[in-house]
Amino acid sequence: MSNSPHVSNDEFFETLQSLLSKQSAQARGSIFLTQKRMPSASTNSTNSTNSTSPSPSAADPSAPATLSLSPILIRATNGKHKSSKTKVSTVVQPGDIEGFFGRYAEVCRAGMVGMKKRDRSARKKGKGKGKEKGKEKEKGKEKEKGKGNV
């Protein structure tokens, strides 16, 4: 990865593809994908210079018009410890979003072929049983306390 904090979209896809293929080959591990809207520098500077002309986006910074023009930060990491952690991020400009997400979906689908969905049913059942046992123990203690007072 270069010295810049964000890589180009093409480099991002290459790195993401390699991360997904490594995790699929290991048959364990996680890949964390995050998206975050970035504040647009161009909208902030135009609002400060054109303060005399009222515009809907200047009055309400959360207006949909300003949100649709914001670039998006996309991050991917394998979530390992600091020494072997792989992190990559890219910034997607508003005009490139549709094409980016088309390719992003293709890369993710291709990389997740070997992965399987986590089975959480056993863990949920175990927690539910533990709570019931705890309630039964409390009831038993209450009965014992009542017997001693009689």
Image (cartoon, rainbow, N blue to C red):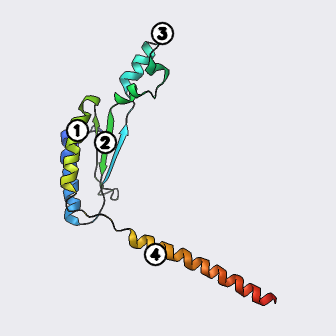
Q: CA–CA distance between discs 3 and 2?
A: 35 Å
Asked whether the residues under the numbered discs 1 and 2 touch, taking CB atoms below 8 Å apart as contact, a structural biologist would say: yes
Q: Tell me the quadrant of the picture where the N terminus can be found.
A: top left
Mark 2 neighbour class, 10 Å CA radius: few under 14, some 14 to 19, many 20 or more:
some
Quadrant of the rendered image containing residue 120 = bottom left
From the top left corner, tell me how far across and down residue 2 is, in percent. 23, 40
Mark 4 highlights which residue? 126
Q: Earlier in the sequence, mark 1 or mark 2?
A: 2
Mark 3 highlights which residue? 52
Q: CA–CA distance between discs 4 and 3?
A: 64 Å
Q: Which of the two discs, 4 and 2, sits closer to the camera? A: 4
From the top left corner, tell me how far across and down residue 61 is, in percent. 46, 26
Q: Residue at x 29, y 48 (%)?
A: 76
When the figure is inspected, residue 45 is found, relative to residue 64, above or below; the finding is above
Q: CA–CA distance between discs 1 and 2?
A: 10 Å
Residue kind at label 1, given as amino acid type: Phe
Q: Residue at x 66, y 84 (%)?
A: 140
Q: CA–CA distance between discs 3 and 1?
A: 37 Å
Q: Secondary structure at mark 2?
A: strand
Labelled disc at residue 58: none
Residue kind at label 2, given as amino acid type: Ile
